[in-house]
Image (cartoon, grey):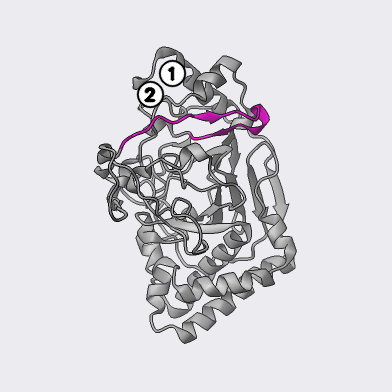
C-alpha cells in the first residue's frame, strides 16, 4: 500500500492560527484539575483504577459539573480551528518540566503512574487538565482497544519501534493521515498537548482546503471507490466484516468546504483503476505541497480538525534518556457536527468507542455502539470488540 508522503519531502511552512490563553485562564485549568484530583483521591477507594482509564463516573461527573466554572476565554480559545489550515495552536497552559518526571519508554509505563506519590498526583492532575480542555471543546472519547481504553493517550518514542508507522516510532516519517479514517465515529477534533519537546520535533499538518485539484480529480476522489482498512493494531478480526468503498473527498458544498478521509498506508490503491490512482497521487502531492509543521513547546496544545486536515510527524532520533518528546492526545467529538447519513451504515470493523460524556439518549451509532453488519449481511446479537495487538499498535503507541 503505497501513496504516503516521501520522507525526503520539502516542507513549506505557513502560518498556523495561534491563540493564547490568558494567564488567569491557564491557571484556572490547573487549579480546577488539582481540586478535582484532590476530591476524588479523598473519596475513591481505588485511585489506581481511576487513573487507569480516566472513565470513572465520579471523575466524569466532576468534570461535567465544574467545567462551566472555567473562564469563557478558555472555551473561546478551544473552539475548532477557524482558518482553512484546519489547525490551531493554543499556548500558555502552565506546567513545569520537573512536575511529571522523565519521559517513559512506553505508553503503558506512562499510564502506570510510577514514581513518588507526589508525581503520581501531578500526573493525574495533568490528565484531568487535558480532559477539562477537551471538554471545553466538545466530547472527549476513547477507543476500547486503544491504550487500555484511556481517554487521554500518551505519545512518546519507544525502543524497538523506531521504524514503524506509529507514534512510538522516531527515525521514520509518520505519514500524514486522518485519525481513524476507517471508522464512522472518528474524531472531529484531535487535541495534542505538549509536555516536552526539546528537539523541536515537528508535527505535520496539511489541509485539504489548500490543495489544488481539477474538477475531474475532485469527481473521481468524491466517488466511493476503495475501503480504508483498520491499521495493523486492530489485529485480523476485521476480515469478517464487509469493507465498503468510501469517498476520499466530500465536495458537495464546494472546494472551500471540502472534507476528507485519508490514510494511504491502509487504502488498497492497487485495486483502483489508473485514473483514480492518478487523482489520488495528485492529492498526495498537493497535501505535501501545502504541508505545515508545528514544533510544539511545553504548554502548547495543537487542535487539528480531523475532517479538514491530515497530520503526521517528521523523523527524529530518540535518546531514551527521559528527555524525549512527550505529548498527550485526546479525541474529541463535536456534537454540532454530525456525520453524514451515508456513513451511518458503516460497520467500523467492529471497533467501539468509549464515550462517557455522551448523553444516554444519544443514538447507538453516535455512541459507537452501533452493531455492524458482517460480510454475510447478518448483525451480531451483542456488540463485538476486537482487541488490538498492542505490541504493534499504531493507535496504542500512537500514530499522531
Quadrant where the image shows the N terminus: top left
Q: Residue furthest bottom?
A: 42
Residue 12 picture quarter: top right
The number of callouts visible is 2
Label drawn at residue 193: none
Q: Which residue is rendered at x = 57% and y = 24% of the image?
A: 286
Q: Which residue is rendered at x = 47% and y = 67% of the image?
A: 101
Residue 274 picture quarter: top left
Q: Is residue 295 visible?
A: no
Mark 1 and mark 2 lie on one chain; the one further toward the N terminus is 2
> Against 104, is 45 above or below?
below
In front: 199, or 354?
A: 354
Is residue 258 on the magenta stretch?
A: yes
Q: Is residue 381 visible?
A: yes
x, y (%) of residue 30? Answer: 62, 71
For the stretch drawn in magenta, what is the main secondary structure?
Answer: loop
Q: Residues within 10 Å of mark 1 (few under 14, many from 20)?
A: some
Q: Are marks 1 and 2 in contact (CB under 8 Å)?
A: yes
Circle 1: element type: helix
* Span of residues in magenta: 242-261
> Against 114, is 299 above or below?
above
Q: Which residue is rendered at x = 37% and y = 54% of the image?
A: 146
In front: 97, or 107?
A: 107
Circle 2: element type: helix
x, y (%) of residue 6? Answer: 46, 27
Name the residue tied to disc 1.
277
Q: Which residue is rendered at x = 61% and y = 26% of the image?
A: 211
Residue 134 picture quarter: bottom right
Q: Residues within 10 Å of mark 2 (few under 14, many from 20)?
A: many
Label 1, label 2: how many angstroms apart (C-alpha)? Answer: 7 Å
Name the residue tied to disc 2.
269
x, y (%) of residue 257? Answer: 65, 33
Amino acid at each position: 500500500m503505497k501513496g504516503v508522503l516521501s520522507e525526503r519531502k520539502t516542507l513549506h511552512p505557513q502560518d498556523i492560527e495561534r491563540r493564547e490563553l490568558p494567564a488567569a485562564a491557564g491557571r484556572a485549568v490547573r487549579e480546577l484539575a488539582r481540586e478535582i484530583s484532590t476530591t476524588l483521591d479523598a473519596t475513591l477507594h481505588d485511585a489506581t483504577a481511576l487513573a487507569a482509564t480516566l472513565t470513572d463516573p465520579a471523575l466524569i461527573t466532576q468534570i461535567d459539573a465544574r467545567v462551566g466554572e472555567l473562564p469563557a476565554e478558555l472555551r473561546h480559545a478551544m473552539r475548532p480551528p477557524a482558518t482553512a489550515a484546519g489547525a490551531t495552536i493554543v499556548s500558555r497552559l502552565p506546567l513545569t518540566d520537573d512536575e511529571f518526571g522523565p519521559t517513559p519508554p512506553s505508553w503503558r509505563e506512562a499510564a502506570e503512574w510510577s514514581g513518588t506519590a507526589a508525581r503520581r498526583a501531578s500526573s493525574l492532575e495533568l490528565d484531568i487538565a487535558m480532559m477539562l480542555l477537551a471538554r471545553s471543546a466538545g466530547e472527549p472519547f476513547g477507543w476500547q482497544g486503544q491504550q487500555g481504553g484511556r481517554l487521554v493517550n500518551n505519545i512518546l518514542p519507544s525502543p524497538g519501534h523506531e521504524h514503524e508507522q506509529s507514534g512510538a516510532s522516531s527515525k521514520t516519517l509518520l505519514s500524514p493521515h486522518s485519525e481513524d479514517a476507517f471508522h464512522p465515529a472518528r474524531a472531529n477534533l484531535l487535541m495534542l498537548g505538549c509536555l516536552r519537546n526539546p528537539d523541536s520535533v515537528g508535527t505535520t499538518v496539511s489541509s485539504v482546503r489548500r490543495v489544488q485539484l481539477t474538477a475531474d480529480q475532485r469527481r473521481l476522489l468524491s466517488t466511493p471507490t476503495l475501503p480504508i482498512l483498520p491499521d495493523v493494531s486492530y489485529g485480523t478480526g476485521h476480515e469478517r466484516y464487509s469493507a465498503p468503498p468510501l469517498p476520499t473527498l466530500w465536495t458537495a458544498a464546494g472546494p472551500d468546504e471540502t472534507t476528507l478521509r485519508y490514510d494511504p498506508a491502509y487504502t488498497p490503491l492497487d485495486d483502483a483503476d489508473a485514473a483514480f490512482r492518478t487523482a489520488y497521487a495528485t492529492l498526495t502531492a498537493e497535501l505535501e505541497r501545502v504541508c505545515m509543521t508545528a514544533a510544539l513547546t511545553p504548554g502548547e496544545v495543537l487542535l487539528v480538525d480531523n475532517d479538514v486536515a491530515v497530520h503526521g510527524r517528521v523523523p527524529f532520533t530518540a535518546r531514551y534518556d527521559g528527555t524525549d518528546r512527550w505529548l498527550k492526545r485526546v479525541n474529541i467529538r463535536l456534537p454540532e457536527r454530525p456525520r453524514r447519513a451515508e456513513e451511518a451504515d458503516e460497520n467500523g470493523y467492529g471497533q467501539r468507542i468509549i464515550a462517557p460524556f455522551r448523553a444516554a439518549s444519544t443514538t447507538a451509532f453516535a455512541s459507537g455502539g452501533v452493531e455492524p453488519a458482517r460480510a454475510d449481511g447478518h448483525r451480531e446479537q451483542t456488540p463485538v470488540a476486537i482487541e488490538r495487538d498492542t505490541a504493534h499498535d499504531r493507535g496504542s503507541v500512537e500514530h499522531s
